[in-house]
Image: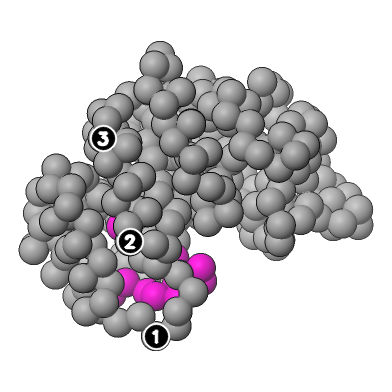
Amino acid sequence: MITRGVYSATCSILNDDYSLNVDATIAHAASTINNGLHGAIFFGSTGQSQLISISEKKDLIAKIASHKLRKKFFLGTGCNSLQETIDLIRYGFEYDFKDFLIMPPAYYKGNTDEGVFNFYSLIISKVPKIKIILYNFEQLSGYKFSVESVTKLAKSFPYNIIGCKDSTSNLFENLKLPNFLMFPGTETKLLKGLELGNSGIISAICNVTAPLARKVFDDFEKKKEQTQNDKLIAVRKVFDDYNLISALHSYMSTKDDNFKNLLPPLVLLNSKEKKDLINKLNNLKFIIKNNLAA
């Protein structure tokens, strides 16, 4: 079960035919854990979840089920279809994966609190033992969870709704629920969130900042002086100047050719943007010492 800590919304690695490279994707997620993270979540937005087929997601689920780090692997769904979401969750349950990061369906504008409540309610009615981390990301889903809407879900389904990833950053300071996990979606909010009683972070950039993020988390837990938080925030702000997935894959492809492919309409940064990104990170003396993908 997911607990306090720092987690990556892990990257998906593609073959040259744009199919999911299951083995390399798993190896990369494992490497982020070996570099300090408490866990990795497959098929969040960073993992191109809306663009990857259900069959490929199932292939990965079956493969990670026997991995030595399986208890540190967690799943997103990344489906707009209610039935596909339930089908994927049930498939995960066959392999004893019960914690899921779930965003409300995207595409249609004007989603209401009632409609989003119904979406999660129907999932829970079909899979009563599921544990759900709500995914609050208005920029992608078109819906912004409010304190009231999360509170209603958590109180209606206290066994099932166990936390929230707050990429919109409107909840981590204001939502106060007992026994509820709160994960901001950015390194810039890690330390502040911990000081407010949050649980850690789930972040795209933890794909490359794992040791830094873990150091900030551990130093907070041990009540030690913070020596790396400013650098961690500065690195995150560099990536925030670009599309995060494009920037991550562009940067990591300089270290490992596995990262060069993205599913359309996503693309790598152009040469000028890539050079600019690398120069900014070099100025911060930020480098990846280990290859993060096999």
**Secondary element at tag 3:** helix
Marked residue nearer the N-terminal end (1 or 3) = 3
**Residue 168 visible in the shown view:** no
Q: Name the residue under label 3.
A: 93
Amino acid under disc 1? Gly
Q: Name the residue under label 1.
A: 110
Marked residue nearer the N-terminal end (2 or 1) = 2
Q: Name the residue under label 2.
A: 82
Q: Residues within 10 Å of mark 1 (few under 14, many from 20)?
A: few
- Location of the N terminus by quadrant is top left
* Residue 80 drawn at (x, y percent): 42, 63
Q: Nearer the viewer, mark 2 or mark 1?
A: 2
Q: How far apart are marks 2 and 3 (CA)?
A: 17 Å
Amino acid under disc 2? Leu
* Residue 110 drawn at (x, y percent): 39, 85
Q: Residues within 10 Å of mark 2 (few under 14, many from 20)?
A: some
Of the pair 15 and 258, the residue shown nearer to us? 15
Give above or below for 65 relative to 80. above
Of the pair 93 and 144, the residue shown nearer to us? 93
On the image, which quarter does residue 171 sit in?
A: bottom left
Segment colored magenta: 133-147
Give above or below for 94 relative to 118. above
Give above or below for 123 relative to 293. below
